[in-house]
Image (cartoon, rainbow, N blue to C red):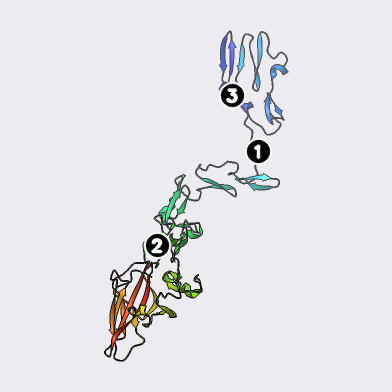
Amino acid sequence: MQGVCVSVLCVCICVSALLRSAISQSHVKTYTNTECTDGYHWDPLTEHCKDINECETIPDACKGEMKCFNHYGGYLCLPRSASVIPAPEPAITPTPAFNPCPLGYEPHGDSCVDIDECERDEHDCQPSQQCINTLGAFNCQCPRGYSKVGTECIDIDECRFRYCQHRCVNVPGSFSCQCEPGFQVGGNNRSCVDVNECEMGAPCSQRCFNTYGTFMCRCDQGYELGPDGFTCNDIDECRSSSYHCQFRCVNEPGKFSCVCPEGYQLVGTRMCQDINECETGEHQCSDTQTCVNIHGRYQCVDANRCQEPYTHNSDNLCVCPHSKPACRDLPYSVVHRYMTITSERSAPSDIFLIQTTNFLTGSFNTFRIRSGDDNRDFYIRQTNNYSAMLVLARAVSGPREYTLDLEMLSGHPLVGQRSSSVLRLSIFVGQYTF
């Protein structure tokens, strides 16, 4: 509201707008054409009636000592000592432009177009709400995952509805499903499907087997699973058992192998068999020697082992005829034989059969160990009149060599002289039990 202050003789007199309204009440109207009341003229720029300053347009508007003061729709004549302090003019509120379109629309050329109140921020939606423009209006809606409580949007706890197969984690406006270890969220983002860890780099050092929700590590033959459940460690089969190999076990990664000592060959996977160098031709015996196979090796012996007064009669046979004086007290013949036995052979054990090939009807024969058995490791068991068995009395260890003279004494009731023959048996005891 506007007022005018008048100062007379240093006294300030305020003429209020109420008084001014009373003075010129008929002159404050707003017109929509060029006709204005007295004291006003039409201003085409503002399209309003504007006050006329009579103090400028009327010559000698005030007489004598009076001073002219312009006023709305008129003027005042006051003493010259008076001063007028005008109040600020009221702001002119522009007249809204005429809108021929319905509410929520605005003219665009010859037609009316919808006003997007959401884009222009001309809505009254709450910060938690979303403005949705509609034809001629707008709506305030809650975002997905929220429900309207009063004027506010409150988060919906979707986990209450058990949407997830395993675990549900509520988040503002939504939720997420999580799975237990060994599973992953399926294509519908709710169910949990098994993870094939074996195809995703499971830490198994050898073989991997996928199971529901987890996996298992397995090892190849010859390995065992370590404490961590992933690493495969070699099994030392040679340490776990001493019966894998007949001679020696050699551990290898994931397996083992058996080896045999020199002079033997592997039969199958674990057994050792003596190599008969005399048959394979791997010996180095000369033409004047005989190759004798022994467990694990061979021996070269002279083909003629006869010693005086014996003479060589045939292979391995030496004869000392009684016609020679030196042969009277000696066995008539000496036959050389060779055999080999394994070390620690079980005893008692029959090892060699002694049998005469020539004997007279009515004669009687006896057998004995003439020499070479100082420790009594052998004995003779006679089975009948013309044969006997050499028996190993106790187990012996090799390598060792015995030379036994096995004598057969023959007698006849009609012949007073007794005769004898010797079988000189060389026994080679091998180093091993096989």
Q: What residue type is labelled 1?
A: Ala
Dot in front, 3 or 1:
1
Q: Give the number of callouts.
A: 3
* Residue in the foreground of this view, choosing between 227 and 343: 343
Q: Measuring from the top left, give residue 34's x and y in whole percent.
A: 71, 31
* Residue in the foreground of this view, choosing between 277 and 405: 405
Residue highlighted by disc 2: 238
Q: Is residue 288 left or right of residue 421?
A: right
Q: Measuring from the top left, give residue 157's x and y in whole percent.
A: 43, 50
Dot in front, 2 or 3:
2
Residue highlighted by disc 1: 97
Callout 1 environment at 10 Å: few (<14), some (14 to 19), or many (20+)? few
Query: In percent of the image, x 51 and y 60: which residue is there?
Result: 199
Q: Measuring from the top left, give residue 180's x and y in whole percent.
A: 42, 55
Picture quarter with the N terminus = top right
Q: Is residue 86 visible?
A: yes
Q: In this view, does 159 lie to the left or right of 102?
A: left
| Above or below, 376 relative to 117 | below
* Residue 340 lies in the magenta-colored region: no
Q: In this view, does 131 lie to the left or right of 216?
A: right
- SS of the residue under disc 1: loop
Residue highlighted by disc 3: 21
Q: What residue type is labelled 2?
A: Cys
